[in-house]
Amino acid sequence: MENSSFLSPPAKRPFTMQDNNITNGGAAKRRSKPPPPPLAIPLGHIGLRLLCHVSKIGGVIGKSGSIVKIFRQETGAKIRIEEPVVDCDERIILIVAPENPKKIITLKGGLNIEDDKESGEDVQVSPAQEAFVRIFERILDVEAETEGIFPPPGGAVSCRLLAATSQIGAVLGKGGKIIEKIRKESGAKVRVMPPDQLPACASVGDEVIQILGDVLAVKKALVDISRCLQDNPPIEKAQVAGGRPVGTALHGTYPEIYGELPHRNSLVQPPLGSAIDYAPRVDYASRSRPLPAEVDRFSMLDPNKQQDVVFRLLCSNDTVGGVIGKGGTIVRSLQDETGAIISVASSVPEADERVITISAKENPESRYSPAQNAVVRVFTRSVEAGIEKGLDAGSNRGASVSVRLLVATKEVGCLMGKGGAIIQEMRKLTGTGIRIIGGDKVPKCASENDQVVQVRFFFF
């Protein structure tokens, strides 16, 4: 629920783990039934996504899946091929594997170890990273088999991978220092591609990272970039990798409400509660993640177009302390991670809730909303705090959970729509119960002309 219009589904394909009912050569038979549900990413696991041209996907899979099965057995990774998308010449190869145990592999400049007589370079990788490199090597093998020559004219090869916008900051680094270091140490050219070059198979909130260079340089950059991604998982996604010092509070599947959120002008967001699990308590005070790349890019946008975006979230008196944290540690961490200003109002007599105001100056041209991001993060933390105290029903499967926002009465009409058309559409597309509450049921902590937007959903 981030940003002014807090509800909206992906405009493109969601990031899901689909069975690959596919044929060699990249052409897939059209499904006559809905695709299977997303595959949950367990604690301690990470997800990485590689783009592969449709002409090479059959060679990566192998006859009856023989090649991809070998990769699965050797690396322990789950490897799925996303179904083709109309008018898209790339497909997504999705890799899910544990972060540990780490192992040493040797990166070579040839197609494989046997072909390359050079010493290569030893690097430490996770099972997910190893599978990432192995699949990229297989793509090069297929390219050599089909083109008949290797390396190609000019000696350069390319690799394209997908990352959530919230992860790009970890790849770029402050002032671009990290990406410059990767370029210098690997010898590869690394670019975050502009939004208009995002393939149709990607999801809203994805960005393409392109690597270009000789084979060894690209492999080295691929390892470095994948390490950045696994150390900084999508901070809004329900999927959370365990085993690292910090992680987000919820854990589940792609896509989810904590997936990269749609642009503020979109209308409806995915259901809030489907297929979410709770992970162990997080030490928010120890968090130190870079802000999403879009935050750094604000300075590149026209400052005259910036607008104040403000949300007011209601939080139970019983759980608000868990949002603030000892000495304000948690709320400061949330501010650092989102770039928004978060303030908690004082308690009001005869009110069971307190108002948490979340604000940020934002440019409508930006695809990242600090305020929208912070709303979800604060709500997540409030539910987590309730579970820690044994107060929240959301800790039980099938139980309902509510999120409540304050909205000025004059703004309620834009949520309702003519004849209630907009709110009905949001209910239909999200599968949630959305109510506008007014009159004497508005809490005393609200302002005189406020109403409450309440969204109720279930955890399955």
Image: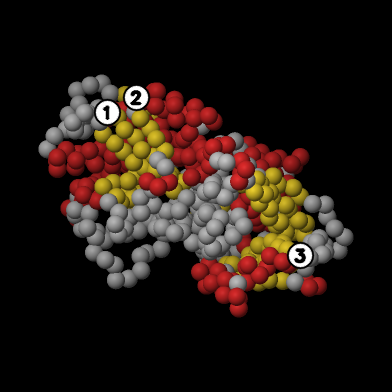
Which amino acid type is marked by label 1? Asp
User: Where residue 313 sits: x, y (%)?
Assistant: 70, 57
* Depth check, front residue: 77 or 291: 291
Using residue 226 as the reference point, say whether residue 282 is left or right of it: right
* Residue 446 to residue 282: above or below: below
User: Where residue 205 sits: x, y (%)?
Assistant: 47, 50
* Depth check, front residue: 92 or 89: 89
**Mark 3 residue crowding within 10 angstroms, few (<14) / some (14–19) / many (20+):** many
Task: Give the structural element (helix, strand or loop) at label 3.
Answer: strand
Circle on res. 214: 1
Along the polypeptide, which appears first: circle 1 or circle 2? 2
Q: CB under 8 Å between callouts 1 and 2?
A: yes
**Where, quadrant-wise, is the N terminus in this rendering?**
bottom right
Label 3, label 2: how far apart the Cα atoms are:
57 Å
Task: Give the structural element (helix, strand or loop) at label 1.
Answer: loop
Along the polypeptide, which appears first: circle 3 or circle 2? 2
The furthest residue to the right: 349
Whether residue 270 appears in this view of the structure is yes
Q: Which residue carries the number 2 mark?
A: 187
Q: Quadrant of residue 299?
A: top right
Residue displayed at 48% across by 45% down = 165
* Residue 144 to residue 72: above or below: above
Residue displayed at 74% across by 41% down = 328
Residue displayed at 29% across by 36% down = 158
Q: Which residue carries the number 3 mark?
A: 450
**Mark 2 residue crowding within 10 angstroms, few (<14) / some (14–19) / many (20+):** some
Which amino acid type is marked by label 2? Gly
